[in-house]
Image: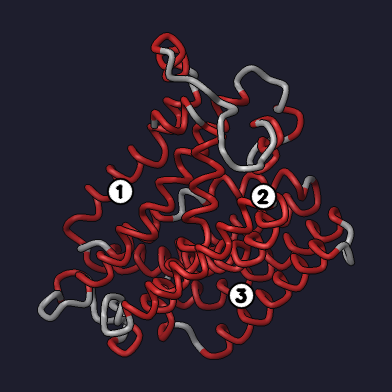
Amino acid sequence: MIASVGFPLLTYTLSLALFGLAHVMSEMRFVRARFGQRLQRWLLAALTLLLTGVVGLRIGKLSGMIEGALATNLELALVVALALCALPVIWRVSRAGFAASALLVVGLVVGLLVTPIHTLLLLAVLHNLTPMGFLVEVAPSRSRGAVMALSVAVFVMIPLFIASGVPAVWLMKLGVYAPDFTPLPTGPLYDHFSAYLPRQWHGLASAQHAFSAVVFAQVMHYAAVIHVLPRCLARANEPGAASMASEDEKAPGSDAESLGSRDALFLFAVVGASAVLFVGFCFDFKIARSVYGVAAAVHAWIEVPILMIALSALVSSSSESR
């Protein structure tokens, strides 16, 4: 929290450069291990096709072949399609989950039709909260209430406290406050507000506090995905962990080797790829950020249908247990 408030540009840029790709790779591995074999083949094929379209749009925008606004609209349309793909599965699992998911899809469609850029910004902010859903889903049933309470404290309450501006006042009085400091070639803090904040907010006095709040949530997102979720998954698949979840909740054994014999190879790949991209960030932050954005889009948008299905199943199992 101190780093996010006192040094928001340093924390945002350095955490992104060091851990951005690592968290993408870690989360994709977690999603594959936890949910890979629960998804029907037609759904996997549809999600793969749509995500390939997202990658194509990002590359087209990066290369200048597709105009930015058009790419934004088309990408959000693909996100709507990803969410729609989950609805038939959810209908068979939970009627309450289907109602909530259908409402989400309606909201995405309204956002696409009214203000696509603001909808994507909102989704970018909310993306930092997605570990809450994964943590609750993988937690032992007896601990889910405590996990949710702790997640709300970390991902919601602390960011709201930061956004109030009170921590910034405290750190300014202590002299621990350099919002534009970073050793990377990033430009001033103001130039990065567009990652999370609407352009109309950039000139507000509270914009920096809001940005710091999202930066804190981003770093907690990285910590949860890289450090916490793999350990939760390993524990969920330990022998004798049947009380952790029902049999259909647990990941199949062949895909659940989260901390198995392939760990060293995966760690080598993560460190190597992250190191290469970090060098790119050191030379040209903007270009490296755009390249990273291609991979980040895949991991962000796959969460939409996965979490919709997983949380609907969780609601259904909780209702049945009662």
Closer to the N terminus: mark 2 or mark 1?
1
Q: Amino acid at mark 2?
A: Phe
Residue drawn at x 76%, y 29% is: 200
Q: Amino acid at mark 3?
A: Cys
Q: Nearer the viewer, residue 101 or 249?
A: 249
Q: Picture quarter containing residue 231?
A: bottom left
Q: Quadrant of the C terminus?
A: bottom left
Closer to the N terminus: mark 1 or mark 3?
3
Query: What is the total number of numbered labels drawn onto the structure image?
Result: 3
Closer to the N terminus: mark 3 or mark 2?
3
The residue pinned by badge 2 equals 285
The residue pinned by badge 1 equals 148
Q: Residues within 10 Å of mark 3 (few under 14, many from 20)?
A: some
Q: Picture quarter containing residue 48?
A: bottom right
Please indicate whether residue 106 sits to the left or right of residue 6 in the image.
right
Residue drawn at x 73%, y 50% is: 111
Please indicate whether residue 182 sits to the left or right of residue 137 in the image.
right
The residue pinned by badge 3 equals 85
Residue 64 visible to the viewer: yes
Q: Nearer the viewer, mark 1 or mark 3?
A: 1
Distance between the Cα atoms at labels 2 and 1?
35 Å
